[in-house]
Amino acid sequence: MTETETPLRPLTRLQQGMIALAMVAMGAGMTINFVVVAPLARKAGLTEIQVAGILTLSTVIYTIMIPIWGRIADRVGRKRVMVFSLFAMGLTNMAFLFALSAALAGVVTGMTTFFLLVFVRVWFGLLSPGLQPASMAAMTDATTTMTRAGGLGMLGAAMSVGSILGPAGAAVLAPFGALVPLWGTIILNLVVGVILAFVLPRSRDRVRESHRPKPLSFTDARVRPHLMFLFIYFVAIGMIQQTVGWFIEDRYEFVDTAARTAAEMAVLFTGIIFSCLAFSMIVVQFGYITPRKPDPRRILPIGLTLVTIGYVCADTFQPFWAMCLSFLVVGVGAALAVPSANALGSLSVSREEQGSAAALLAAAPPAGFIFGPLIGATLYSIMPSLPLMASASVVGILAVYAFVVTARRPISP
């Protein structure tokens, strides 16, 4: 075998699966905040703007810290950073839960509640972002040129599973107490952290500083086009994530029934749509990407085209079953596009720098979700269909770029 066909740091299937499990835990911990924390914070006396401000500030800090933690992982080892991040996520969420409990009990009130929750959430943004860049870098080191899209895609699919488990777990555990779902994700993070500590190989010392490649920055000309590509994509996706629930509620005009209220119906239908999205992503990832290992240059424009078609169909066709089919198509496209874009970004640098590139690219999704929801909400206030049409237009332009430019580039320098 040639050098390019041999992984830098091979991992067994079990070890790769445990890293994917860690991403499931992270995805669940992220999404449950929007399901549980947002309404409870309002009950604690905070306004919608204050709640949004707390979560947005945390996301901004989280995004800024991702590449920093990626460089720390290069120095101290990916395993150490992954384990630390899982424990940090669990413990900072626990601190946030105690602070929220105090606010709900009336121990703290007014602006004291706001600043207390901001303080705790800042520590979440500072300490927990290392899992994503470290896991992506570890998977990059464990894969080859032809298997990279499958490896990185598996992590993306794992996050999708976690994004389903978060809201689903909240629905199952909520009858036992409003804060019980948060305890569930905290325990999951801590348990997975312990498992990783035992299953993953020991963090090996990196080469000495004089021989270590220079850490990559956002301005690196090789990675920057791929980073901007992913950032723009996730801005477009963030527009839909923020507004699709409102879109469903307004389109189908639910009414209260003996079985369910209108609000419960809106939540149920929105959950079905996201389940369709995640289901098709998982099927394509494990049924096609992982076993077939297709060329990322070939499937990237196809995936983006499918996402565009799905969004257009979701706006065009009225029946709910048609909307479900539309988001199944979106999920297929996302499963093809996102791991391909990540793989091409990591392959744009030398082999020794590919782990750092993958860690840097991990900042794109949270960065996109800083701006996408705000843009989507603004467009929705003008016309409900505008977010879908705007996202379809943006992703369509990316598809043309991927077909004309990206598909014609060499797969590695």
Image (spheres, rainbow, N blue to C red):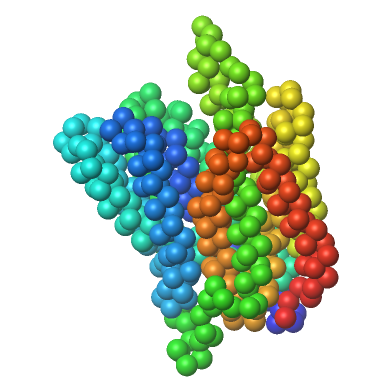
> Residue most toward the left?
107
Q: Is residue 28 left or right of residue 147?
A: left
> Residue most toward the bottom?
210
Look at the picture and state if 111 lies above or below 133.
Answer: above
Depth check: give the residue in front, 255 or 270: 255
Residue lying at 71% horizontally and 55% vertically, measured from the top left: 337
Looking at the rendered image, the quarter that the C terminus falls into is: bottom right
Q: Position of residue 296 (x, y in %)?
A: 76, 63
Can residue 113 be seen here?
yes
Q: Is residue 89 left or right of residue 78?
A: left
Q: Is residue 279 left or right of residue 162?
A: right
Asked which quadrant contains residue 186, the reply is top left
Question: How many numbered marks are there?
Answer: 0
Q: Is residue 232 left or right of residue 186?
A: right
Residue lying at 52% horizontally and 85% vertically, measured from the top left: 214
Residue lying at 23% horizontally and 42% vertically, measured from the top left: 111
Residue lying at 65% horizontally and 77% vertically, measured from the top left: 222
Q: Position of residue 338 (x, y in %)?
A: 67, 56
Q: Position of residue 297 (x, y in %)?
A: 78, 64
